[in-house]
Image: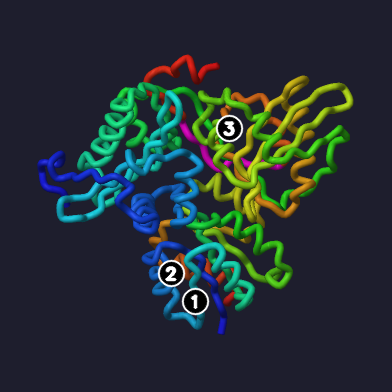
């Protein structure tokens, strides 16, 4: 238990002072009772931090002065913006101000770096966290979907189209640099940092066209970026997904943080994607002009 | 002996299942992550797989997809163990070829054991 004077009882230590194994253990402990726990081993956590530009220097672990672990909070940093992620407090130490202290520390770090625009996502119905973020000045921007498609989903024939497979370089050219106000996980940098990125570009008989960029992991397709350049987004997306899933029929698929009003969404549902859960996207401050491009 | 493969990353949860089933004639094989789970499933060909959906390397849905692609496991029921809301759990069960699900936390041990027996068709 924490002493009554919580503020002086909590020590905030840079994540850089912990090994990936220690960090994964702390993070997993904070989530044991979550509805969607999303545990990570050291390898996965290190990849997460690299992909999402999480700063080890500015992220924090909370401990008591006796060394008892209390929680963790991570800060992602990119041009003109910051991202708070993986905030978690170990269950039996909650409601003692640890979450607030961790949040305050990271907000302070961002301000010190002259970053006044901070993004985060919170799992829908995680009311305590949502309320804390509101109190700290975050406001709701929209709702995001996490979707899954099982490899057991019946295959569909690829829609007739001129389909071009893209290597990493060509894929990243299409992704471009103008995704700074997208959810952090789907911004350009997330794909630039990821390994095994490729894509496809497709033109339909009526001239509709678009592209889809993705990461292919050992057993999973993930981290999608897509755009319809000409035509109806749901039609173009369905055609692109029909080609993608024919190419990788045995891979599971998980895509994160698709905005609920994304016009491509009907194509995903038609292709057998199911909703796993929702997040609420929240911002603090306003996006600076350089990332609104 | 009837073999149950338990894929669960949290040691306390694994211990709870082990204790709950300790009075039965079941051998519990434990895997703490998905890759080990796949390996042990193929080595032991268990009679039942209890699969936590939140795992530290690949999640339970991805593992279920691999397991269902293995014909040697066609006769093995795979049951999701999850804290997800019922509606989501049902969607995942249907999409990923699970034979059913058990809600976390496991509180009523008697009900849990009865469910395990029913998946194993123990009279």
Q: Chain of mark 1?
A: B
Q: Nearer the viewer, mark 2 or mark 3?
A: 3
Residue at the image point whose x is 41% and y is 67% from the top: B109
Q: CA distance from mark 1 to mark 3?
A: 40 Å
Answer with the quarter of the image where residue A218 lies.
Answer: bottom right
Answer with the quarter of the image where residue A123 lies.
Answer: top left
Residue A90 in sight here: yes
Vertical order, A13 against A138 (above or below): below
Residue at the image point whose x is 54% and y is 66% from the top: B50
Q: Where does label 2 land, which residue? A: B17
Q: Residues within 10 Å of mark 2 (few under 14, many from 20)?
A: some
For the rendered model, the colour scheme is rainbow
Residue A148 in sight here: no
Q: Is residue A276 left or right of residue A158?
A: left
* Residue furthest out toward the left: A4
Q: Write the start and end of the magenta stretch as one range.
A: A272-280
């Amino acid at each position: 238990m924490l002493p009554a004077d919580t503020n002086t009882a909590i020590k905030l230590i840079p994540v850089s002072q912990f090994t990936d194994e220690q960090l994964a253990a702390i993070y997993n402990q904070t989530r044991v009772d979550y509805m969607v726990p999303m545990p990570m081993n050291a390898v996965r956590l290190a990849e997460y931090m690299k992909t999402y530009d999480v700063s080890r220097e500015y992220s924090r672990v909370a401990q008591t002065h006796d060394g008892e672990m209390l929680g963790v909070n991570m800060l992602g940093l990119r041009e003109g913006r910051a991202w708070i992620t993986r905030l978690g407090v170990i269950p039996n130490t909650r409601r003692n101000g640890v979450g607030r202290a961790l949040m305050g520390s990271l907000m302070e770090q961002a301000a010190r770096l002259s970053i006044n625009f901070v993004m985060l996502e919170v799992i829908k119905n995680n009311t305590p966290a949502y309320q804390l973020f509101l109190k700290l000045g975050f406001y709701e921007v929209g709702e995001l979907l996490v979707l899954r498609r099982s490899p057991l989903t019946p295959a569909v024939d690829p829609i007739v189209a001129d389909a071009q497979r893209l290597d990493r370089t060509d894929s990243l050219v299409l992704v471009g640099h103008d995704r700074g106000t997208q959810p952090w996980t789907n911004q350009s940098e997330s794909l630039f940092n990821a390994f095994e990125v490729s894509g496809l570009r497709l033109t339909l008989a009526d001239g509709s066209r678009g592209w889809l960029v993705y990461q292919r992991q050992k057993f999973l397709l993930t981290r999608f970026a897509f755009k319809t350049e000409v035509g109806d987004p749901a039609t173009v997306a369905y055609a692109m997904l029909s080609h993608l899933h024919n190419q990788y029929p045995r891979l599971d698929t998980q895509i994160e943080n698709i905005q609920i009003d994304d016009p491509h969404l009907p194509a995903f549902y038609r292709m057998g994607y199911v909703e796993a859960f929702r997040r609420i996207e929240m911002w603090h401050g306003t996006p600076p002009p350089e990332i609104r491009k | 002996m009837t073999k149950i493969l338990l894929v669960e990353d949290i040691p306390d949860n694994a211990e709870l299942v082990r204790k709950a089933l300790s009075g039965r004639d079941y051998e519990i094989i434990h895997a703490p992550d998905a890759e080990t789970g796949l390996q042990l499933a193929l080595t032991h060909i268990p009679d039942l797989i209890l699969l936590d959906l939140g795992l530290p390397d690949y999640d339970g849905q991805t593992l279920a997809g691999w397991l269902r692609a293995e014909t040697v496991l066609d006769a093995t029921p795979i049951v999701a163990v999850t804290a997800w809301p019922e509606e989501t759990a049902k969607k995942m069960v249907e999409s990923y070829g699970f034979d059913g699900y058990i809600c976390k936390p496991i509180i009523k041990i008697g009900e849990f054991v009865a469910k395990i027996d029913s998946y194993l068709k123990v009279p």
